[in-house]
């Protein structure tokens, strides 16, 4: 089922998500709906709070070397905890909850996390590149943070002005 993606400045996006404790059919349905929604909206990552569910869950599905977004490469991350953040990198990020806006964000270059999969099994992952960036971006959603909070004061002012203007144009 394709669900609605909440967009900035919806207050729900600032909520802190809660740990998942039950790994049942209902959780699997939520994960499947998140996947369907992310693909329908042409995203590569989605956190549960973006569809209004305040649980510590996100999914990431990057394109492979051939540029194909294959479901085989889908990563489902539940209750993540950072074990390592190292180095620094800058990447132009976007977000399904901030449609049409992209800006450079500084993040760690290498991350290691432990998390649970859809069956509650403990997993670990150490990675860099786009996947490391996506993990940090999505994890921020679990704590109620958006990438626009990390772009610097002047860019943020410009964003707020233009985003409001664009919203007005859409509704008129
Ligand atoms: C988060 O972002 C991310 O503005 C996922 O009009 C960002 O899927 C991971 C999207 C940067 C790694 C690097 C954005 C789609 C999708 C838009 C997304 C839009 C349509 C963003
Ligand atoms: Co996002």
Image (cartoon, rainbow, N blue to C red):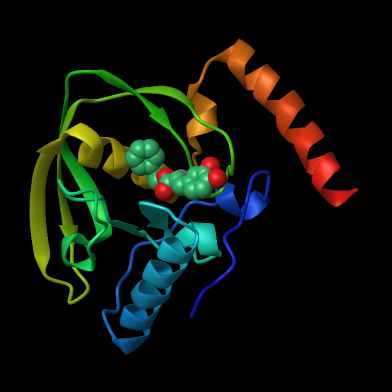
Left or right relative to 45: residue 63: left
Q: Between residue 106 and residue 41, name the one nearer to us.
A: 41
Left or right relative to 30: residue 69: left
Above or below for 53 versus 25: above
* Ligand 1 location (quadrant): top left
**Residue 129 can be seen, yes or no:** yes
Q: Between residue 10 and residue 105, name the one nearer to us.
A: 105
The residue at the far right in this view is 172
Task: Return the x and y of residue 136 as percentages of the image width and height.
Answer: 31, 38
Q: Between residue 135 and residue 129, name the one nearer to us.
A: 129
The residue at the far top in this view is 154
Task: Return the x and y of residue 20 as percentages of the image width and height.
Answer: 33, 68
Left or right relative to 60: residue 64: left
Task: Return the x and y of residue 99 as percentages of the image width and height.
Answer: 59, 44
Above or below for 3 versus 65: below
Marker count (numbered):
0
The residue at the far front in this view is 66
**Residue 143 can be seen, yes or no:** no
The residue at the far bottom in this view is 25
Name the residue: 22% across, 47% down.
Answer: 81
Above or below for 69 versus 37: above
Toward which corner of the image does residue 107 lie, by quadrant? top left
Name the residue: 34% across, 62% down.
Answer: 19
Name the residue: 56% across, 64% down.
Answer: 52
Name the residue: 31% across, 88% down.
Answer: 25
Above or below for 125 versus 121: above
Task: Return the x and y of residue 47 as percentages of the image width and height.
Answer: 41, 56
């Amino acid at each position: 089922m394709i669900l609605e993606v909440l967009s900035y400045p919806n207050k729900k996006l600032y909520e802190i998500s809660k740990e998942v404790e039950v790994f049942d059919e209902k959780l699997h349905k939520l994960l499947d709906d998140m996947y369907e929604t992310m693909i329908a909206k042409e995203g590569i990552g989605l956190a549960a709070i973006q569809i209004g569910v305040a649980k510590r869950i996100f999914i990431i599905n990057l394109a492979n070397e051939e540029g194909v977004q294959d479901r085989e490469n889908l990563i489902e991350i539940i209750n993540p905890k950072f074990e390592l953040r190292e180095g620094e990198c800058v990447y132009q990020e976007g977000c399904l909850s901030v449609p049409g806006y992209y800006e450079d964000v500084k993040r760690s270059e290498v991350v290691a996390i432990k998390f649970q999969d859809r069956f509650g099994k403990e997993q670990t992952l150490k990675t860099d590149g786009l996947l490391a960036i996506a993990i940090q971006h999505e994890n921020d959603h679990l704590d109620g943070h958006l990438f626009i909070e990390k772009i610097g004061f002047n860019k943020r002012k410009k964003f707020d002005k233009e985003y409001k203007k664009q919203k007005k144009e859409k509704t008129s």
